[in-house]
């Protein structure tokens, strides 16, 4: 078993602190915001009657997050990133904070609708809905990891954006 590093050089400590302190854009997200339809389906999802399927692009990311055999050129990397973008939404390098995302109406609506179901947490565990949600969240995380890996791979191969992270604007 690999042991975690117990000490960092000053440079690595500073880089870690800067990475943790940097604000993440609010529009880059792991899970899509629920709309009216999703809010209405909350009781059905809690009973595991209408579960959400994992999108195919995320299934691939779960099964093979670091697969490179198919990625013969930059266009293949761009295609995989585009497929993940269609499911995940904007990546951190292009998402922008408009300052209006303090509250999510969809999540508040889901919470209100879900509160009508007594013993909701226990019910979700018994029906398997909670496990389905955990699997879906894990798939979204795997998709974000895969997209980051692909952009790093594209950067290493000298590909142009969007097969690599978007270059920082000049003057920043």
Image: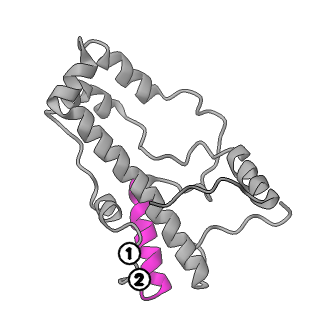
Q: Are marks 2 and 1 in contact (CB under 8 Å)?
A: yes
Q: Secondary structure at mark 1?
A: loop
Residue wearing tag 1? 67
Image quadrant occupied by the C terminus: bottom right
What range is drawn magenta here?
A: 72-87
Q: Does residue 47 appear in the picture of this structure?
A: no
Q: Residue at x 28, y 55 (%)?
A: 55
**Quarter occupied by residue 7:** bottom right
Q: Judge depth for marks 2 and 1 and give the one in front.
A: 1
Q: Main secondary structure of the magenta part?
A: helix
Residue wearing tag 2? 71
Image quadrant occupied by the N terminus: bottom left
Residue 76 relative to residue 159: left or right: left
Residue 124 spot, x, y in % from top left: 22, 26
Q: Rounded to the nearest whole Å, what is the CA distance between mark 2 and mark 1?
A: 8 Å
Residue 87 spot, x, y in % from top left: 38, 55
């Amino acid at each position: 078993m690999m042991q975690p590093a117990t000490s960092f050089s000053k440079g690595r400590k500073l880089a870690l602190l800067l990475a943790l302190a940097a604000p993440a854009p609010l529009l880059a997200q792991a899970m899509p915001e629920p709309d009216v339809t999703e809010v209405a389906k909350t009781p059905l999802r809690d009973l595991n009657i209408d579960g959400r399927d994992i999108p195919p692009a995320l299934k691939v990311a779960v099964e093979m997050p670091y697969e490179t055999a198919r990625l013969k050129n930059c266009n293949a990397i761009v295609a995989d990133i585009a497929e993940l973008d269609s499911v995940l939404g904007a990546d951190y390098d292009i998402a922008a904070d408009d300052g209006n995302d303090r509250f999510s109406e969809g999540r508040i609506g889901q919470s209100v609708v879900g509160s009508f179901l007594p013993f909701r947490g226990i019910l979700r565990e018994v029906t398997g809905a909670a496990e389905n949600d955990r699997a879906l969240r894990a798939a979204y995380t795997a998709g974000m990891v895969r997209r980051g890996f692909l952009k790093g791979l594209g950067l290493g191969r000298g590909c142009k954006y969007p097969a690599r992270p978007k270059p920082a604007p000049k003057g920043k």
